[in-house]
């Protein structure tokens, strides 16, 4: 398995290793949380660190009962189901893959399904134990009155259905028995992988014939009846289904069309992995908008996530003081170094004489002949910017201001020729909204970066220069760890992730700092993928999307993650598109020649 660059760079913060109660204590709800809360099937997608596991854990009773937030009661009212969180057991998935290489396809499929069903049943029993246990400290959510006698009746009614050999008289007993079955299944599978004589014992294991919906309903019907809630819904919250065998992924997707209204599913999946939206739109699967809803944790426009990021940072800062001696609490804007380099005050005064924008335009026009020519072509006098108003302003200098600011910052005159300035500790990307954009409003990236800044603050070393150093260092580490992403071998040299990103970043930088001033340079690349194109390009694009290194902005269009903006000195926006093939030249590779062909 390839290494996750976000983990390599920013540490191992991951909700997967935390209980729902711990997750709830630091939880800030993104807008998408309110989309997945209501009753119904959902598929949650987003790159690493975007919060998929966190959101699924917050749909469980422990999460909703523990969340201390003004809208927690509203969330609890919307979640009218019992949330059963089923984590992806990566270690077991890896073991199954290794063990089953010598098995036939049917045995391999049955073994993967058996392991998944046992893990899911164990999670359901844990949910039942919580529902019938003590009440929550802040509020009660999805609680049930189940006495010990009724609990024993339910356990004794399902143990044989689940293939448990000995009678069980409690939910905890069911949980332990399921754990033992998982262990015995693994033991027999390992024996069968070494000696074919054990294959028959594996085929006869009681878990091999279990169907999740059927065996779950045996428990759900009894539990619901005992509570007097015959139609109560149970939601299987299945995390990271990309780690499950392909057959199970297909079965989960197909079951979203509804085999029983008392069971729904909310799945999380990394974007562009084995199970794709193609499966979700087939007749055998659920139909988006009818049987399920797709919820993407990325933000199409970076500004849409700023409020969420701001609240997340405020929660992480907590009651931290501005200085050890001061009584005032440290603010988000103060920690991050102001609003941001690109965020200038809007309105009529934004380009008045003496304003920051007016000074930047005048200064750049004096040293940049390409920019001066562009101003002249549009009839703009940098000494009289107040004359440029309304639509004319919005279509010229207002649209170009980000490029103007960057060229002024990074181009300097060397004996009459403009050269790109090399400075390591620039403050262009320091500031509240700049850091939000660089982190793509991704909780894991943002929390880790805030941790580094808070450490500087506590040490009394937080300055604009040190902020810039933290941001730049994080971005460089992220770029360095692109080499950990596996795309398969052999692979064309142009499709090695770090070289691919570097080629694109360099091409975009040439557009921003070229001799001719371009107010809207290309910052997005288009990829037309013919059916006959070899898989290498698609695989690499999928992997880079999975890890958040590139961001889809259209069906075959992508931009670089803003994490690379400080490296290539790029603006924090999408820009217009250009074709991929010219970006990758030279040299002209076989892949590029295939890209030039039309289907």
Image (tube, rainbow, N blue to C red):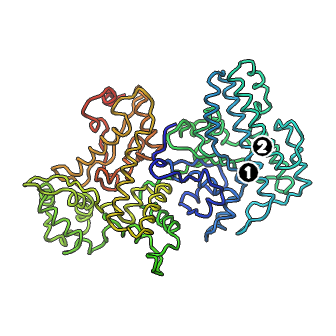
The reply to whether the C-beta atoms of the residues labelled 2 and 1 are less than 8 Å apart is yes
| Residue at left offset 73%, top offset 21% | 199
Query: Given the current orientation, which residue lies at the most extreme top position?
Result: 197
Image coords of residue 535 (percent x, y)? 43, 29
Q: Is residue 99 left or right of residue 297?
A: right
Answer above or below: position of 94 versus 42. above
Query: Given the current orientation, which residue lies at the most extreme front position?
Result: 459
* Quadrant containing the C terminus in the rendered view: top left
Q: Is residue 325 left or right of residue 153?
A: left
Residue 470's tag is: none
Query: Given the current orientation, which residue lies at the most extreme left position?
Result: 415
Q: Quadrant of residue 269?
A: top right
Query: Given the current orientation, which residue lies at the most extreme bottom position?
Result: 327
| Residue at left offset 22%, top offset 60% | 409
> Which residue lies under the disc numbered 2?
216
Q: Is residue 53 left or right of residue 388?
A: right
Foreground residue among 62 and 518: 62
> Which residue lies under the disc numbered 1?
234
Q: Is residue 214 left or right of residue 237?
A: right
Image coords of residue 511 (percent x, y)? 23, 48
| Residue at left offset 50%, top offset 48% | 48
Foreground residue among 15 and 344: 15
Lower sequence index among marks 2 and 1? 2
Answer above or below: position of 554 versus 33. above
Real-space CA distance between mark 2 and mark 1, rounded to the nearest whole angstrom? 10 Å
Image coords of residue 268 (percent x, y)? 59, 46
Answer above or below: position of 244 versus 66. above
| Residue at left offset 90%, top offset 41% | 167
Identify the element where label 1 is drawn.
strand
Question: What is the crowding at mark 1: few (fewer than 14 residues within 10 Å), some, or many (at least 20)?
Answer: many
Q: Quadrant of residue 24?
A: bottom right
Identify the element where label 2 is drawn.
helix
């Amino acid at each position: 398995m390839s290494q996750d660059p976000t983990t390599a760079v920013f540490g191992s913060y991951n909700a997967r290793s935390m209980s729902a109660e711990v997750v709830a204590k630091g939880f800030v709800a993104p807008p998408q949380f309110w989309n997945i809360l209501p009753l119904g099937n959902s598929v949650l997608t987003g790159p690493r660190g975007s919060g998929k596991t966190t959101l699924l854990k917050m749909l469980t009773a422990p999460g909703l009962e523990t969340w201390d937030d003004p809208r927690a009661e509203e969330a609890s009212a919307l979640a009218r189901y019992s949330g059963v969180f089923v984590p992806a057991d990566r270690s077991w998935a890896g073991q199954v893959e290794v063990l089953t290489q010598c098995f036939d396809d049917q045995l391999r499929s049955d073994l993967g399904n058996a392991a998944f069903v046992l893990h899911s049943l164990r999670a359901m029993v844990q949910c039942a134990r919580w529902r019938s246990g003590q009440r929550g400290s802040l509020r009660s959510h999805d609680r049930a009155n189940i006495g010990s006698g009724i609990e024993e009746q339910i356990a004794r009614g399902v143990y044989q259905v689940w293939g448990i050999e000995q009678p069980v008289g409690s939910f905890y007993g069911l949980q332990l028995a399921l754990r033992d079955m998982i262990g015995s299944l693994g033991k027999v599978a390992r024996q069968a992988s070494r000696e074919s004589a054990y294959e028959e014992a594996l085929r006869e294991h009681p878990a091999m014939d279990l169907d999740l919906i059927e065996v779950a309903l045996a428990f759900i019907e009894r539990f619901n009846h005992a509570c007097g809630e015959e139609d109560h819904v149970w939601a299987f919250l299945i995390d990271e289904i990309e780690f499950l065998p392909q057959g199970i992924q297909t079965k989960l997707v197909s079951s979203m069309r509804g085999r029983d209204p008392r069971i729904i599913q909310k799945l999380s999946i990394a974007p562009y992995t084995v199970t794709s939206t193609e499966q979700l739109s087939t007749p055998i699967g659920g139909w988006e908008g009818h049987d399920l809803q797709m919820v993407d944790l990325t933000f199409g426009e970076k500004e849409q996530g700023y409020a969420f990021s701001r609240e997340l940072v405020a929660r992480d800062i907590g009651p931290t003081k501005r200085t050890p001696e001061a009584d005032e609490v440290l603010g988000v804007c103060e920690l991050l170094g102001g609003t941001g380099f690109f965020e200038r005050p809007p309105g009529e005064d934004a380009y008045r004489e003496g304003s920051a924008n007016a000074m930047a335009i005048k200064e750049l026009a004096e040293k940049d002949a390409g920019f001066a020519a562009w101003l002249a072509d549009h009839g703009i006098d940098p000494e009289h910017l107040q004359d440029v108003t309304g639509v004319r302003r919005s279509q010229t200098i207002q649209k170009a201001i980000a490029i103007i600011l960057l060229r002024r910052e990074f181009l300097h005159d060397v004996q009459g020729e403009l050269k790109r300035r090399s400075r390591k500790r620039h403050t262009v990307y320091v500031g509240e909204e700049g850091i939000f954009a660089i982190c793509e409003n991704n909780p894991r990236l943002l929390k880790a970066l805030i941790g580094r800044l808070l450490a500087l603050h506590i040490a009394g070393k937080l300055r604009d220069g040190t902020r810039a150093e933290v941001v730049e260092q994080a971005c460089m580490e992220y770029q360095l760890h692109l080499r950990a992403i596996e795309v398969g071998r052999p692979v064309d040299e142009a499709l090695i992730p770090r070289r691919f990103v570097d080629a694109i970043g360099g091409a975009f930088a040439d557009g921003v700092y070229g001799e001719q001033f371009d107010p809207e340079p290309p910052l997005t690349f288009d990829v037309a993928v013919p059916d006959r194109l070899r898989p290498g390009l698609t695989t690499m694009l999928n992997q880079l999307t999975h890890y958040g290194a590139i961001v889809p902005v259209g069906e075959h269009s992508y931009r670089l993650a803003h994490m690379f903006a400080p490296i290539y000195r790029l603006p924090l926006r999408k820009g217009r598109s250009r074709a991929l093939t010219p970006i990758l030249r030279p040299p002209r590779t076989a892949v590029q020649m295939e890209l030039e062909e039309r289907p």
